[in-house]
């Protein structure tokens, strides 16, 4: 059966060259990068190399990159680390209503510890209002955390303008760039970004490794206590193969960035136009402009998302959903409610995120499966049957 | 997440549809929760359920439980149908993930409501 993977926002396949690059660090050059002997130094050298590549990717300095176990750890560290280090100066943090759960839950945790959190609203395309940000900053504000690009609907925030406002008001600016690395051009100097989270497995690196960029001079509490790794800021034996893999994946991604993002945007647009043209009663969520090139998000009205996903999966197509039934928590997507999407329509939401492996034939096949599944599910649906008349299917 | 039995009921659900002149109709759930079950029953003069149909807005568990529950009531008296619990629906499916058990509760409630609808119409006649 043909298999079509359209869930690249959840995770990506690791490039074969990345795997090859990692392998020696398991069995041959397996030393602990903190060790003084030549085994250790070989590993340390490889880590340094990867660190340079990652730093260059965002125009930061080599010693401003700290490796973590992934994006979630980087997010937790940034929020909690800054909060606790600066609580004598203030206890107010500003974030948005559409952040990744790692940010939302970290803020929720801090609010129980006595911190005050403001959640900026977004418009129906998922963009924050810069005026609202400006007006939310108070004397006791210490941190602003706004994600670069949203994982559900792809909206890309105006980082440079946000950075300017934060700098003028002397508050730290953190951005969760997990979905944006290798796609959006990020320059931490030009954009006045103080902290940035990234995760390797979103750009064809291995899972279990990420990084937090911390501008030199930004004080934050250490997250992991123990040894002196990562300039005594994040204890734990370095995951050398993971770091090497992350560096290699970033190197390859940056080399092919223009060409690949163009291909991905084109194939995504081909898919989106086909769905809008051939499937009745669909809503396209998110913006047309300033959107991640790989992201497509549809609400299929009158049906429920998880049953769509299963139908797709039975035909070899992998995607994901924002419906309550498909989430472990049984709560519908907070991003969709933040953009004002109709609650019922949100239950029928499916996200498709593309890669260069997806072909035009794959898209044609996927749209046929969508049409077939929609027809079957709408036939069963009491909501659809309340409508008068069956729409014309192409 | 789902076992083979649930997947089969999802792929080929039985008793999907509506009914002309149903004896009783039960609708449970609401769309903002992501689940609506609507069950139609045909009941004869001896209070035996001769046919059952369903419509569902919901996940695979909702579709599978509706399919199995409607099958379970066909041919039963309304007293027997009133004994059906959500546990028996889940057992008939060989189990459901714990966060999906509520779908089986909806199926049981929809059947009860359809029977109550029939009984209240009958007492008014």
Image (spheres, rainbow, N blue to C red):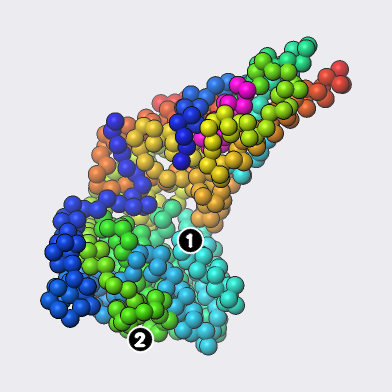
Residue under label 1, please give it.
Answer: A101
Residue B101 vertical placement versus A184 (above, below)? above
Whether residue A217 is situated above or below residue A338 in the rendered picture: below
The residue that appears at 43% across and 33% down in the rendered structure is A311
Where does the C terminus of chain B fall, quadrant-wise? top right
Quick check: marks 1 and 2 in contact, CB under 8 Å? no
* Residue most extreme to the top: B45
| Relative side of B68 to A375, left or right | right
- Do we see residue A345 in this rendering? no
> Residue at coordinates 54% horizontally, 38% vertically from top-left?
B96
Q: Identify the residue shown where x is 19% and y is 62%.
A: A26
* Element at label 1: helix
Q: What is the span of residues highlighted in magenta in the rendered image? A: B58-72
Where is residue A205, by image quadrant?
bottom left
Instruction: Residue B69: say if magenta.
Output: yes
User: Could you say where residue A98 lies in the image, as x and y percent from the top left?
Assistant: 49, 60
Compare marks 1 and 2 and give the one earlier in the sequence: 1
Q: Which mark is residue A217?
A: 2
Viewer-closest of B12 and A240: A240
**Label 2 crowd (10 A; few <14 / some 14-19 / many >=20):** few
Foreground: disc 1 or disc 2:
1
Residue A259 position within the rendered picture, expressed as x and y whole percent measured from the top left: 20, 53
Residue B38 in the image: state x and y as whole percent: 65, 29
């Amino acid at each position: 059966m043909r298999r079509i993977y359209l869930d690249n926002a959840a995770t990506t396949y690791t490039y074969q060259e990345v795997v090859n690059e990692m392998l020696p660090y398991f069995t041959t050059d397996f030393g602990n990068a903190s060790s003084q002997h030549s085994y250790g130094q070989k590993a340390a050298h490889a880590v340094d190399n990867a660190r340079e590549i990652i730093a260059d990717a965002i125009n930061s300095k080599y010693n401003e990159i700290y490796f973590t176990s992934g994006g979630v750890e980087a997010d937790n560290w940034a929020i909690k680390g800054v909060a606790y280090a600066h609580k004598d100066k203030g206890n107010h943090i500003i974030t948005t209503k559409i952040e990744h759960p790692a940010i939302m839950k970290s803020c929720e945790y801090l609010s129980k510890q006595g911190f005050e959190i403001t959640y900026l609203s977004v418009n129906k395309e998922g963009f924050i209002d810069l005026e609202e940000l400006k007006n939310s900053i108070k004397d006791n504000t210490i941190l602003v955390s706004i994600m670069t690009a949203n994982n559900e609907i792809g909206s890309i925030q105006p980082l440079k303008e946000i950075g300017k406002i934060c700098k003028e008001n002397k508050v730290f600016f953190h951005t969760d760039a997990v979905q944006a690395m290798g796609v959006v051009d990020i320059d931490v100097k030009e954009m006045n970004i103080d902290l940035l989270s990234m995760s390797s497995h979103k750009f064809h690196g291995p899972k279990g490794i990420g990084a937090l960029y911390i501008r030199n001079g930004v004080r934050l509490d250490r997250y992991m206590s123990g040894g002196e790794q990562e300039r005594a800021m994040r204890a734990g034996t370095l995951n050398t193969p993971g770091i090497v893999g992350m560096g290699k994946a970033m190197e390859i991604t940056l080399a092919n960035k223009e060409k690949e993002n163009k291909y991905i945007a084109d194939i995504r647009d081909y898919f989106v136009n086909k769905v809008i043209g051939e499937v009745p009663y669909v809503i396209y969520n998110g913006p047309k402009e300033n959107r991640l090139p790989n992201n497509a998000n549809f609400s299929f009205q009158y049906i429920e998302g998880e049953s769509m996903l299963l139908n797709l999966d039975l035909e070899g197509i992998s995607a994901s959903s924002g419906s309550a039934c498909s989430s472990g928590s049984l709560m519908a997507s907070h991003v969709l409610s933040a953009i004002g999407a109709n609650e019922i329509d949100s239950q029928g939401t499916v996200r498709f995120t593309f890669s260069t492996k997806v072909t035009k034939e794959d898209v044609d096949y996927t749209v046929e499966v969508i049409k077939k599944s929609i027809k079957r599910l709408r036939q069963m649906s009491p909501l659809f049957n309340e409508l008068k008349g069956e729409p014309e299917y192409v | 997440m789902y076992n083979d039995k649930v997947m089969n009921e999802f792929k080929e659900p039985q008793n999907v549809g509506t009914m002309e002149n149903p004896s009783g109709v039960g609708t449970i759930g609401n769309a903002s929760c992501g689940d609506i079950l609507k069950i139609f029953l045909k009941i004869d003069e001896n209070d035996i359920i001769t046919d059952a149909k369903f419509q569902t807005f919901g996940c695979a568990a909702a579709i599978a439980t509706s399919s199995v529950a409607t099958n379970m009531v066909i041919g039963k008296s309304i007293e027997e149908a009133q004994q059906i619990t959500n546990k028996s629906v889940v057992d008939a499916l060989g189990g459901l993930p714990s966060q999906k058990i509520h779908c089986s509760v909806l199926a049981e409630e929809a059947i009860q409501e359809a029977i109550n609808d029939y009984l209240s119409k009958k007492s008014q006649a």
